[in-house]
Image (tube, rainbow, N blue to C red):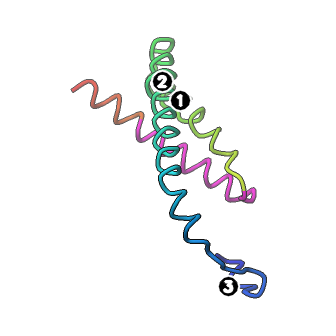
């Protein structure tokens, strides 16, 4: 978006609406499969394994969240600063989700 504002002559918008609309179902199905696998693997398998190995819940939350965040660094098309921001946001998001999972499971 910043490139479009700074150098508007270098970006051409020519949407092919038939191609865009026909790809929406494939994108939705792919998104559902990808996010489901990610949650099943990290929350259902990896974090439960960490819970069995380590009794310190804070350590499990931090390590699980870091391992959850590292694959998100490979998101293409971003610079180094944005990659670091994605890592931090995903890490804290993983901490939140894992913390609430642990506290709600006790209730």
> Observer-nearest residue: 62 or 23?
23
The N terminus lies in quadrant? bottom right
The residue to which callout 3 is attached is 5
Q: Vertically, is 20 above or below 62?
A: below
The residue to which callout 2 is attached is 47
The secondary structure type at the circle numbered 2 is helix
- In the image, what residue occupies the spot 47% across and 52% down? 25
Q: CA distance from mark 3 to mark 1?
A: 39 Å
Residue 8, picture quadrant: bottom right
Looking at the rendering, the stretch of residues picked out in magenta corresponds to: 77-97
Q: Are marks 1 and 2 in contact (CB under 8 Å)?
A: yes
- In the image, what residue occupies the spot 56% across and 35% down? 68
Mark 2 or 3, closer to the camera: 3
Q: Vertically, is 34 above or below 14?
A: above
Q: Residue furthest bottom?
A: 9
Q: CA distance from mark 2 to mark 3?
A: 43 Å
Q: Which numbered disc covers residue 64?
A: 1
The secondary structure type at the circle numbered 3 is helix
Crowd around label 3: few <14 · some 14–19 · many ≥20 (10 Å): few
Q: CA distance from mark 1 to mark 2?
A: 6 Å
Crowd around label 1: few <14 · some 14–19 · many ≥20 (10 Å): many
Residue 44 in the figure: left or right of residue 64: left
């Amino acid at each position: 978006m910043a490139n479009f504002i700074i150098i508007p002559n270098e970006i051409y918008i020519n949407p092919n609406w038939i191609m865009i609309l026909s790809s929406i179902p494939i994108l939705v199905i792919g998104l559902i499969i990808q996010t489901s696998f990610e949650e099943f693997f990290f929350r259902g398998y990896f974090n439960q394994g960490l819970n069995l190995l380590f009794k310190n819940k804070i350590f499990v939350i931090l390590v699980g969240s870091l391992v959850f965040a590292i694959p998100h660094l490979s998101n293409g098309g971003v610079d180094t600063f944005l990659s670091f921001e994605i890592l931090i946001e995903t890490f804290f998001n993983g901490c939140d989700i894992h913390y609430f999972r642990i506290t709600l499971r006790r209730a």
